[in-house]
């Protein structure tokens, strides 16, 4: 049972436009959400996070939105740049001593010059 | 460079064999996490060690085991390998005992079972 779902395996966007990556979750205990970016032959790197007490968090060109009632979060990248081309993973954690992350399957973003 | 080192980068082995994957965490990090990424899947949490002790267990098969040594490096042992064990295995490390924004991933070990 996939508790974190990224239903779009791939997304192509023109340079300078907005990229919107979506993520849905089913576990209502999740209270902390993260986005990771992964380039080929590298490990995932942390991008941005949001706590369930917020509905928006912004860091430069990256903004994450959380809709708790819909159990949905999205990552907006504005403006998109060719260097943003990577696989983006959504992850979530629930309260607990270890808080291990549950990851989605990832979305391959391609930003076209 | 995340500071987390995984060896080897690639491994090809036959079914039924046993392999050991190694992870050196960032200097000062006490936690090591192991994740498995199969084709078109997200990263699946396997196991976490904190300062030498097992702290959390995920969907780790009985054929798999791990340990963290006094110098804090960790090894993931995979035995009686099956074709379905072919995957990318990632190690991550963090200072504290929880997986949060301060966790850093290694480059991964790509295991191919033939």
Image (cartoon, coloured by chain):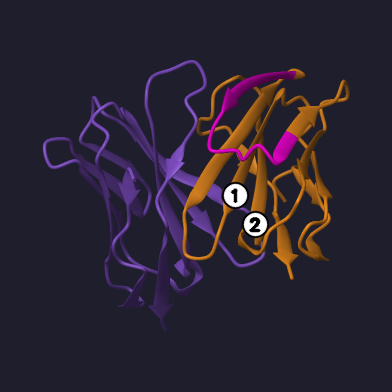
On the picture, is B114 further left or further right than A22?
right
Quadrant of the rendered structure where residue A33 is? top left
Q: Are marks 1 and 2 on the same chain?
A: yes
Q: Which residue is mark 1?
A: B36
Question: Vertical placement of B42 versus B60: above or below?
Answer: below
- Circle 1 sits in a helix, a strand or a loop, which is it? strand
Q: Is residue A70 magenta?
A: no
Mark 1 burial class by Cα count in 10 Å: few <14, some 14-19, many 20+: many
Mark 2 burial class by Cα count in 10 Å: few <14, some 14-19, many 20+: some
Q: Residue at x 74, y 71 (%)?
A: B114
Measured as percent of width and height from the top left, residue B2 is found at 69, 46
Discs 1, 2 touching: Cβ within 8 Å: no
Measured as percent of width and height from the top left, residue A50 is found at 33, 35
Measured as percent of width and height from the top left, residue A92 is found at 38, 37
Labels in figure, total: 2
- Circle 2 sits in a helix, a strand or a loop, which is it? helix
Magenta residues, as a range? B53-65
Measured as percent of width and height from the top left, residue B63 is found at 70, 41
Q: Which residue is mark 2?
A: B85
Chain drawn orange, letter? B
Q: Is residue B57 magenta?
A: yes
Q: In this rendered view, identify the residue nearer to me: A87 or B74.
A: B74
Q: Residue at x 55, y 59 (%)?
A: B38
Look at the image and give the colour of chain A.
purple
């Amino acid at each position: 049972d996939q508790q974190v779902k990224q239903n779009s395996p791939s997304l192509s966007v023109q340079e300078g436009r907005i990229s919107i990556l979506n993520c849905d979750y089913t576990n209502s205990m999740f209270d902390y959400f993260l986005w990771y970016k992964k380039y080929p032959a590298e490990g995932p790197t942390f991008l941005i996070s949001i706590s369930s007490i917020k509905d928006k968090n912004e860091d430069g060109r990256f903004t994450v939105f959380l809709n708790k009632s819909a159990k949905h979060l999205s990552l907006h990248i504005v403006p998109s740049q060719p260097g943003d081309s990577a696989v983006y993973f959504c992850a979530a954690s629930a309260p607990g001593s270890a808080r291990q992350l549950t990851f989605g399957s990832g979305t391959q973003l391609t930003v076209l010059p | 460079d995340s500071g987390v080192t995984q060896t080897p980068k690639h491994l090809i082995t036959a079914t039924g064999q046993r392999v050991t994957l190694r992870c050196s965490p960032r200097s000062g990090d006490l936690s090591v996490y192991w994740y498995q990424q199969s084709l078109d899947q997200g990263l699946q949490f396997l196991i976490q060690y904190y300062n030498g002790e097992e702290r959390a267990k995920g969907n780790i098969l009985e054929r798999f085991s791990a340990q963290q040594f006094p110098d804090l490096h960790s090894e993931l042992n995979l035995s009686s390998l099956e074709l379905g064990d072919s995957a990318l295995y990632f190690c991550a490390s963090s200072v504290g005992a929880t997986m949060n924004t301060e966790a850093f991933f290694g480059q991964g070990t790509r295991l191919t079972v033939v």
